[in-house]
Image (tube, rainbow, N blue to C red):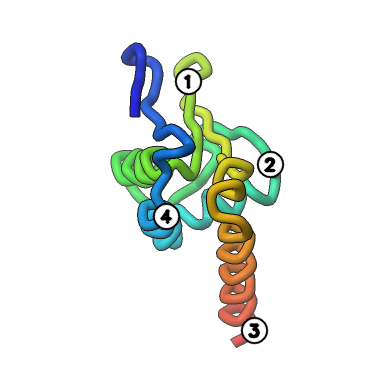
Amino acid sequence: MTAASSRELAHPRSEDIALEEVLHALSDPLRLSVVTELASTGGEFPCSHFPLPVTKSTTTHHFRVLRESGVIQQWYRGTAKYNRLRGEELDALFPGLLAAILRASAAQSARRTDG
């Protein structure tokens, strides 16, 4: 991971993204909810867009785990930190993994809502 300045955030290179770190990042329900929204919209959103029911420092931790695992890319736009899913890169490394996890998460949510 490299970052050239204090305003640039370190991200793993695609070839350095490890399956176990991706799975760990996606194992948390709050982080998975962020990824689900990014995947469903294909958008780029600031951290403040995601109303996570935790403190600001815990929110920062969750986004750092997602970034350092290679699941998302982050950058500063003014004072806001923006996020986008590294979906194409993840799919190239682990074909079908992200889609399968998102389908399983949606199915689990549906079961919880129905039950």
Q: CA distance from mark 2 to mark 3?
A: 28 Å
State which tag comes first along the sequence, 1 or 4: 4
Residue 17's spot in the image, x, y percent?
42, 43
Compared to residue 93, the image places residue 106 above or below, namely below
Say which residue appears at 57% left-offset and 76% top-offset. 108
Q: SS for tag 4? A: helix
Using a 10 Å C-alpha cutoff, classify the residue at mark 4 as few (fewer than 14 neighbours), some (14 to 19) or many (20 or more).
some
State which tag comes first along the sequence, 3 or 1: 1
Residue 20's spot in the image, x, y percent?
37, 57
Instruction: Identify the residue under disc 2.
Output: 42
Say which residue appears at 54% left-offset and 48% top-offset. 93
State which tag comes first along the sequence, 1 or 2: 2
Q: CA distance from mark 1 to mark 4?
A: 27 Å
Instruction: Identify the residue under disc 1.
Output: 76
Amino acid type at image mark 4: Leu
Horizontally, is 23 left or right of 41 in the view?
Answer: left
